[in-house]
Amino acid sequence: MSIHTSRATRAAALALPALLLPGLACAYVGPGAGLSLLTALWGIVAAIGVALLFVIMWPIRRMRRRRKAAADESAAKVAEPPVDETPAGHTDESPRPGDDDRRV
């Protein structure tokens, strides 16, 4: 096993510098292709960023909605007058605010 491992290590050590030499590539990338590449890259980065933002914001929005609903519910309970009591200045014969004036 050690002979095969050392051969693989030697081959990788010789191949890596050859693959990393940029002088061997005779290629030209024009401005249109470069801008297209950058635009696509920024689009992908923006899409990933927005997706992560929505995943992070989901529980925060849910928590804020629950707190708001609880606050609205508690405010509604405080604002409602008790059903048994007659508002000040009203007798049993006079209609209560919000009651229908039509009597059946």
Image (cartoon, rainbow, N blue to C red):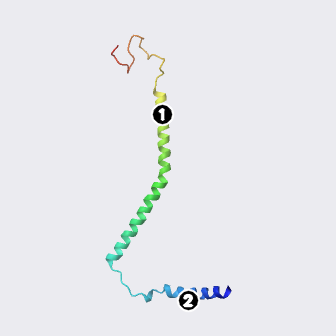
**Left or right, 7 with reference to 51:** right
Q: Is residue 97 above or below residue 47?
A: above
Q: Nearer the viewer, residue 30 or 2?
A: 2
Q: Is residue 54 above or below residue 16?
A: above
Question: For the residue marked with disc 2, what is the amino acid?
Answer: Leu
Alpha-carbon span between mark 1 and mark 2: 73 Å
- Which residue occupies 49% across, 49% down? 60
Q: Whole-percent x and y of residue 7? A: 62, 88
**Left or right, 13 with reference to 87:** right
Q: Is residue 56 above or below residue 98?
A: below
Marked residue nearer the N-terminal end (1 or 2): 2
- Which residue occupies 52% across, 87% down? 17
Q: Whole-percent x and y of residue 65? A: 47, 43
Q: Place residue 86 in its image quadrant.
A: top left
- Which residue occupies 47% across, 40% down? 68
| Residue that label 2 marks | 14
| Residue that label 1 marks | 73
- Which residue occupies 44% across, 61% down? 49
